[in-house]
Amino acid sequence: MALRRRLSGLLFAALLVALCGLSVAAYQKVFTPRVTVLLRTDHVGNQLQAESDVKLLGVLVGEVRAIRSRGDGAEVELGLHPGQVDRIPANVSARLLPKTLFGERFVSLELPEDPAGALGDGAVIEQDRTSGAVELERVLADLLPTLQAVRPDKLSSALTSMAQALDGRGATLGQAIVRLDAYLRELNPQLPVLKEDISEFADVTGVYADAGPDLLRALSDATAVSRTIAEQRADLDAVYSSLTTASADLTGFLRANGETVVALADRSRPTFELLATYSPEFGCVLSAVNAIRPRMDQVLGKGTDQPGVHVEFTVVPPAEKYVPGRDDPVHRGGGPHCPSGPATAVAPDRVPEWAGLLTGGREGGHR
């Protein structure tokens, strides 16, 4: 009886161990059929772990079974679902991409432009070497130090604050986006004009660039002028003081004699109007005086050894007395008049009568 109980206990313990082993094997998917392939890559990083996902076009097709180093790189053992292998070409490549900003990586299978064959058990997949994949890998490598420097708690706090700020404002943000779209629709037809304005602005800046030395020279000259003004500040102060005194004296004079100046200007207006009326004759008079000057120099004996003018006057009583109204001088002119040429009136060979009298007096005659 005791032996039977001992055997039952041993059998129960063995059964527990077997169940635990089956559970572990089931968890590790030992009994799940898989197609094993190898992925050769330069590096895998710390984010790629066993049991990481393997996806094709976003669809889960397997998981990472093991990661091994091979000296110059790494080998990743992939376990693919048998039902998905037929859809994967033999010349497929792979990328190691992060799930989230700080999350683990997964294997993304990339379809080639020209798929060929079907992937089989034991096949080898190479890392994607296209320019896009290399650029993406470089971006992720450059971003890694930044992500390592960012404190997750601070980033989480910032993202939480942003989420709280945007919470409940979806309608407002939608309206803002709609308005922005309307503005962009109105701006798009004006893009050629804007481009032309920018081009012309570039031309203007080119002109200013060409004129830059002249502008700098002008600024330098202005600096010299300002320096001169600063050096002559004492003289300028004296000039300003003199002008202030003169303006004060002029102000006092105008205050004391303002009415007189206004009355004088008013009374002088008829005289100025008469001078303005006869102003066309001023040129003729001055031209005639200038033309007769050589003859008068001859009459007066300038530049010769002859004596100057000699005149004798004899006062005789008038024949009749002056009668006002009868003997008043009469001006018979027709207003301002200027001959066609001053030489017709003042030419040296047409000396006026009074000049002949002066000439005769100089020669000794008496009239």
Image (tube, rainbow, N blue to C red):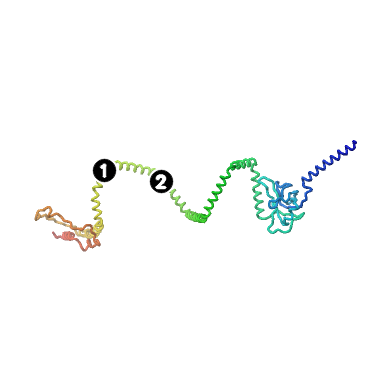
Q: Is residue 184 left or right of residue 152?
A: left
Q: Where residue 365 sits in the image (x, y, percent)?
A: 14, 60
Question: Which amino acid, mark 2?
Answer: Ile
**Quadrant assignment for the N terminus:** top right
Q: Where residue 8 sits in the image (x, y, percent)?
A: 87, 39
Q: Secondary structure at mark 2?
A: helix
Q: How many marks?
A: 2
Question: Which amino acid, mark 1?
Answer: Glu
Residue 174 appears in the rendering = yes
Instruction: Work out how far the residue at label 1 is from the one at label 2, CA to CA, in angstroms.
Output: 41 Å
Please tell me the numbered disc located at residue 229.
2
Residue occupying image coordinates x 14% and y 54%: 328
* Lower sequence index among marks 1 and 2: 2
Foreground mark, 1 or 2? Answer: 1
Residue at the spot of label 1 = 259
Q: Is residue 105 left or right of residue 217?
A: right
Residue 293 appears in the rendering = no
Of 107 and 58, the residue lying toward us: 58
Q: Image quadrant of residue 329?
A: bottom left
Q: Where residue 364 sits in the image (x, y, percent)?
A: 15, 60
